[in-house]
Amino acid sequence: MSVTQQLIALKTNLPQSVTLVAVSKTKPNGLILEAYESGHRDFGENKVQELTSKHEQLPKDIRWHMIGHLQRNKVKYIVPFVHLIHSVDSKRLLDEIQKQAQKINKRVAVLLQIHIAKETSKFGLDEEELEALLEQKEHYSHIDFKGLMGMATFTDDSAIIQSEFNTIKTLFDKHLHSWEKDPVLSIGMSSDYQIAIACGSNMVRIGSAIFGHR
Ligand SMILES: *Cc1c(COP(=O)(O)O)cnc(C)c1O
């Protein structure tokens, strides 16, 4: 199937309330344009360099999502145009986003990334760190706290995935009063988005199921 066919097939199966972020990392502009021409606008990248060069080269009404680990010294390159940063995993990173956003007088929408997986390699905040950050919310004049993002353990065991997604959904609901209008729970990738949606996801990040294997 072509990219357009994969997108249409996916979208007809997703509930209306779920936003599909097409993860285009490592994929050429031609494939992104094909998806764009079929009407798709939300694309996700995990590297600053690739994100900024694709933003420069592709149509300006694309909504770019930063989904990968973000280094503080690169924040300034994406703040001017990024639609949503999914991967805020430390207070120091959030401080830098606030600083750069204030500089250009822009509000930046963010998700706080929660460490839900068993793997120690995955980035993210634990519950205590999340709560400490949210207590200082008023401090961040140029940040829109939209919700949470998480990645489940890489496993075939759907019970583990489901339990991890339930953990983040519980945290998301517990802090519902903290989120800006239209809160976002970004969980679910190609292999586990159906479980994520059953657990309350309203934003899925799907790469290989649209663009093929990387
Ligand atoms: C690559 C990536 C995805 C998409 O993964 P697929 O398995 O290709 O759907 C989703 N989220 C993050 C953070 C990623 O880095």
Image (cartoon, rainbow, N blue to C red):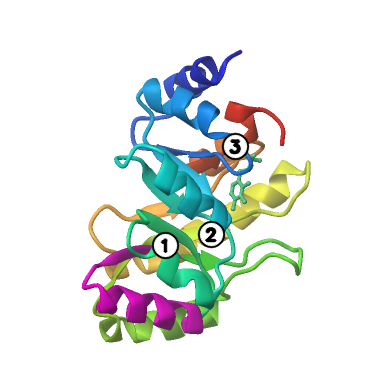
Q: Which of 207 and 145 is in front in this view?
A: 207
Q: Residue 148's spot in the image, x, y percent?
A: 45, 61
Using a 10 Å C-alpha cutoff, classify the residue at mark 1 as few (fewer than 14 neighbours), some (14 to 19) or many (20 or more). Answer: many
Q: What residue type is labelled 1?
A: Ile
Q: Residue 45 carries which label?
A: none
Camera-side residue: 21 or 159?
21
Q: Which mark is residue 48?
A: 2
From this view, report whether residue 107 is shown above or below residue 33. Answer: below
Residue 57 screen position, x and y as percent: 43, 41
- For mark 3, what is the residue? 207
Q: Locate the N terminus by quadrant.
A: top right
To which quarter of the image does residue 150 belong?
bottom right
Q: Residue at position x 43%, y 60% from top? A: 85
Q: Please say whether residue 203 is visible from this viewpoint.
A: no
> Disc 3 residue type?
Gly
Tag 1 residue: 78
Please give the range of residues in magenta: 91-111
Nearest to the observer: residue 114 or residue 73: 73
Residue 142 placement (x, y as % from top left) = 26, 74
Q: Can residue 22 be seen in this view?
A: yes
Q: Residue at x 30, y 70 (%)?
A: 178
Contact (Cβ within 8 Å) of mark 1 with mark 2:
yes
Badge 3 density bin: few <14, some 14–19, many ≥20, Cα 10 Å: many
Q: In this view, does 200 lie to the left or right of 82?
A: right
> Is the residue indicated by label 3 positioned so its CB lies within 8 Å of ligand 1?
yes
Residue 106 inside the magenta-drawn segment: yes
